[in-house]
Image (cartoon, coloured by chain):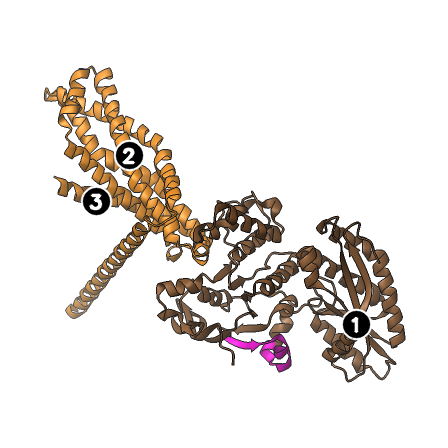
Chain colours: A brown, B orange
Amino acid sequence: METPLIEFKNVTKRFGEKTVLDKVNLNIYGNQITTIIGKSGTGKSVLLKHIIGLLKPDEGAITFQGKPVNTMKKNEWEACRSQMAYLFQNNALLDSMTVLDNVAFPLRQTTKFSKAAIEKRALKRIEDLELTEAIHKFPSELSGGMQKRVALARALVTDPKIVLFDEPTTGQDPIRKNMILSMITHYRRKFGFTAVMVSHDIPDVFFISDRIVILWEGTVGFEGTYEEAVRLKLPMIDEFLRSLDGFQDELTGLLSREAFRVHYAAMLGGTATVAAVSAALFSVQLDLMHETLGPQAAVEVLRALGEYTNRRFNPIGGFSARHSRDEILTIFPHTSISEARQLVADFAQELKHEAIDRIQSITIAKIGVATSFDIYIRAGIAVVSPTDAIDQIIEKARAKQEIVATHRCGSGGNEQ
Amino acid sequence: MTSLVQIYILNAMVHLFSFVGAGTLRLLGNFGAIAIFFSLAFVNIFRRKQLREIVNQVFYIGARSSLIVMLVGLFTGMVLGLQLFYTLVKFGSVGALGSAISLSLVREMGPVLTAIMIAARAGSGMAAEIGILRISEQVDALYTMGVDPLRYLVSPRIAASIISFPLLTAFFDLIGIIGGYLTGVLLLGTNAGTYFYRVQSSLNMVDIRGGFIKALIFGAIVSCICCFQGYFCHMRTDGYGAKAVGLATVSAVVLSCVTILIADYVVTSFLM
C-alpha cells in the first residue's frame, strides 16, 4: 500500500474549552488533489494550518514522509516546510507592497537568484494569472478576485511540491472559480505538486479532486473518492453533499449532478410510456485549450457550450448536466437514436453559425496572427435502456464520440 | 462568631496571596518571554539580507523623528534656562547656568525625553504596524513563505532603534543647550562667554558616555517592548482584532515609558 505523504495520527487540537479537532486520523497521498469539505467551524483551516506548522497539535502526531514532525530537527523541518506553499483564505497579501513585489517576495527572501531571474519568474506567474495590468498596483487597489489570484501567483512562484489551498475560490464569480480550479489542476499536472484544498465549489471541486475528506464535528467523517462517497449513501454524507449541491451548475446553467439524477430517476419511473430514450455526450478539450488559449478562454468556451446545450435541448424536453470537467451529458426522452442524431447534427450547425462569433471573441485575443488552433466539439450518441445507470450511459456514449463541430481560431478565427 | 471572622480573614489572605502570586508569575513569564524574544531578534540582526531593511527603519525611526526630537529639545533647554536662571540668581551663582543646563540634559533629560518621544512616535507605529500584520495573517504568511517573521519584522527595528536613539539623543542635547542659551543669554542677559565656558568645562566624557549608554539601552527596551506588544497582540485576552491592535499600541507606549524611567534609575545608579 502506498505510504502517505502526510499522516495525521489521533491529532487533537483545542482552543480553550473548545475541541476543534478530535483524534483526527487522516492520510494525504502525494501527487493527488485532496479536498477537505465540512460545515463552517469544523476545523478545516485548522487542519490545513497543522500541515504547514502554523499550529501544533495538543495531542497526537503528524508525520511527513513517515517521520513525525515533532521529532524533526529544525533544519529537517525547514527542508520539509520549504516544499510547501499556503494560500490563505483572506489572501494575506503584504499590503505595503505592489503585486510584483508580493509575488517576487518569497524568491527575494529565500533564494539566491539574480534580480533579473526573480523578476522574470514573478512576471511569468503574473502573466499566467492574467494580472499583468495590475503589476504596479497595491492589494488595496484590487478587487477581491484579483487579490486571490495574486495570492495564488505568490503561492506558486516557488514551484512548491505541496500546495495548501484554504478556500481558493471564495469571492470569485463562476468563471473565475472554474478558472482557478482549472489552473490548480493544470499546474498540478504540469509541476506535479500535491494539493490539499479546502473548498465548497460543487461540482467542480469533485471533478478535480482525487480524494475528498469530510470533516464532521471535529473528526474525519469520510475519506475517499467522490464516487465512493456517493455510493456509500451514509445519511450524514448524503445530507451534507445534497446541502452543498444546488439545483444548477453555476458555470454553465445546466442541472447539477444531483438534480440530473432526480430527473433521470423520475423519467425512468415512467418508462412504460417512454417509447425511446437517447443520450448524447458532448465534450471539449479543456486542458488543451487551457494550455493554448489560457484558463479564462477555456472556461468561457465550456460555459458557452453549456449555455447552447441548455437553450437548444431544454425546450424539447431534454436535460443536461456536466459529468466531468469537460463533458456534458444530455438525455433526450421520447427520442429515437436517429432523431437524436438529427438533433445533434442541427445543434452542430447552430454552434457553427451562432456560437462561432462568441467563441471567436473569446479566443481571438489569445491567439497570435501567425498561430491557429482548432477547438473540436465531440459528441457521442447512445441508446438508453431503462436499466442503465448514468455511468453506463456515459461509457456507451463516450465510445461513440466523434467530432461534430470545429472552430479554428487565430488568423481571423475561421469556422470549418 | 470569632471563628467566622477568622475564616473570612483567612479567605481574604488566600485571595490576596493568590492574586499577588498569579501576578508575579505572569510578570516573570512576560519578562522571560520578552528576554527570549529580544535574544532571538538580536541574533537575527546579523543574518544576510538585513541591511536594506535596517536602513529603511533608521530612516523611519531616526530621520523622521529628528524634527520632533529637536523641537522638544529646544523647548526643554529654554525652560531649563528660565527655571535655573531664577533659581541660581537667588544663590548668586548665575554663572553656573551653562553647567547646570548641559549636565541635566546630557546625563538625564536628553536620553529620557528622547526615548519617551520616540516611544510615542515610532514605538506606537511599530506596535500598530506589526499588530495589523499579525491580525491580517501577514505574519503567518511570512512564515509559510519560509521567511522568519522575527528576522524580517523585528530585528531591523531593534537594530535601527539601537542606532537611532544615541544619535537623536545627541541632537536633543545639542539643541537643548542652544535653547538654554536663547533664554539664559539672549533673553535674560547672562554672559555668553561664561555660558559656553561652563558648558565646555563641566561636561566630561564620562557624562556623554553615560548618556549614550542610556540611549542605547532605552533604544533596545523601546523597540523590544513595542515589537513584542504588536507581535503577540492576537494572544491578548482583553480584545480581539482591531481592538487588540489598539490595546497593544497603548500598552506598548505606556510600558515603554514606565520601563524607561525604571531603567534610567537602575543605569544611573550603576554609572554614578
Query: x, y percentage for residue A126?
Result: 58, 50
Dot 3: chain letter: B
Q: Earlier in the sequence, mark 2 or mark 3?
A: 2
Badge 3 marks a residue whose secondary structure is helix
Side of A1 where A226 appears, left or right: right
Identify the disc placed on residue A401.
Answer: 1
Q: CA distance from mark 2 to mark 3?
A: 19 Å
Q: Amino acid at mark 1?
A: Gln
Real-space Cα distance between discs 1 and 2?
Answer: 79 Å
Residue under label 3, please give it: B263
- Give the residue number, with chain letter if any, for mark 2: B167
The quarter of the rendered structure image containing the N terminus of chain B is bottom left
Name the foreground residue: B169 vs A115. A115
Q: Is the residue marked by circle 3 packed among few (<14), some (14-19), or many (20+) residues within 10 Å?
A: some
Dot 2 crowding, Cα within 10 Å, few <14, some 14–19, many 20+ = some
Label 2: chain letter? B
Residue at 57% of width from left, 60% of height from top? A168
Q: Image point 80% across, 70% down: which residue?
A: A402
